[in-house]
Image (tube, rainbow, N blue to C red):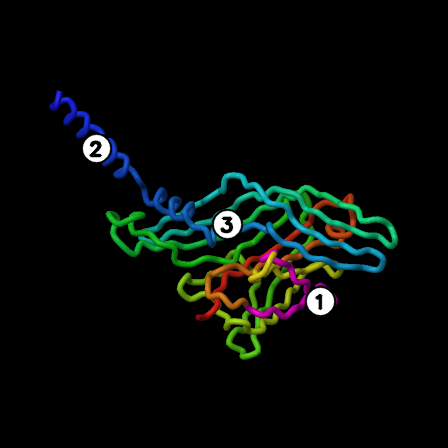
Amino acid sequence: MRSKILILAFAAMAVVVSQCAKETDEDAIRDLIAADTVWFNPNTTVDSTSGAEEDTLVVWWRSAQTHDEPIIDIQIIGDSAWVAYSRGNFGYFYSLAKIDTMPWVLWSKDLSETAMIRATFLRSGEETDEHRGWELNSISLAEGRSDEVFTVSIDSIRITTATEAVDLLITNPLNTYFNIDSLITFQPGEPVTLTLYTNVADGHAFLHTFILAFPYYVRLPFSNEGNGVYQGTWNAQLVAIPRFAIFDLMSHSTLYTPDQPYDFHGWLLPYMISQ
């Protein structure tokens, strides 16, 4: 009986060793992506703001979202890997509108969008190390766009600070990469001027930011400078953790017309607050 137990134990161990041995470099990178809670979770939930135009007042927000399985393309050459990641976000877009002296009315629209980000991984260790020695090296900006209708577009973004420590023009979000250990860094509370150049003159642009007070995530509207240019000044957060700043652009009809679909384009900038 003891010999049978030993045989079964060795057999089970052999199966475990065999399964571990079958892990490939691609498997290891996919495991790292699945475990990441900062960079591979781009969505547009938990936000709200308000606006007014002539006789219409609107308060809007997005619902919590569900997601489909991400599409992950991994290209490995030697000890370097390039990753393209995309995922669908699904929920509802709500506008609570008050027109002139009429009662408040709630408009609801289907929200379906695709979020994308790219990254590079490097093998900094040995194949026998955890995750076969792979680790995240750099990430791009993330980009999100509505699925049903997509007419609004952010063409470029300029980011400047008063100290001129940062003066950056970004034209291609998915091909603009930042090393994880040297992200764009702002001083705590530092004023940052953001200028969005877009294809729509009558749209609405917002900055998604985190604050240390309920509801924690809010949208700050950009001023419309005309000719598709939107600008705003943001005071950077105080807590030194890596995160995204989200720049939104939506069509006028998304916010102010009940029977028109959700029309959205967004860029997500990875950044850090200095300690």
Q: Earlier in the sequence, mark 2 or mark 3?
A: 2
Dot 2 surroundings within 10 Å: few (below 14), some, or many (20 or more)?
A: few
Residue 245 counted in the magenta span: no
Q: Earlier in the sequence, mark 3 or mark 1?
A: 3
Q: Quadrant of residue 147?
A: top right
List x then y, in percent, for residue 222: 68, 65
Tell me the SS state at disc 3. Answer: loop
Tell me the SS state at disc 1. Answer: strand
Is residue 164 or residue 95 the one in the foreground? Answer: 95
Dot 3 surroundings within 10 Å: few (below 14), some, or many (20 or more)?
A: some
Q: Which residues are magenta?
A: 215-236
List x then y, in percent, for residue 153: 65, 56
Q: Which mark is residue 161?
A: none
Residue named by callout 1:
223
Q: Which mark is residue 13?
A: 2
Q: Quadrant of residue 224?
A: bottom right
Q: Mark 1 and mark 3 in contact (Cβ < 8 Å)?
A: no
List x then y, in percent, for residue 73: 45, 45
Amino acid type for the residue under numbered disc 3: Asn
Is residue 201 or residue 220 the one in the foreground? Answer: 220
Is 186 placed left or right of 91 in the picture? left
Is 89 placed left or right of 148 in the picture? left
Residue named by callout 3:
41
Mark 2 → mark 1, Cα distance in angstroms: 64 Å
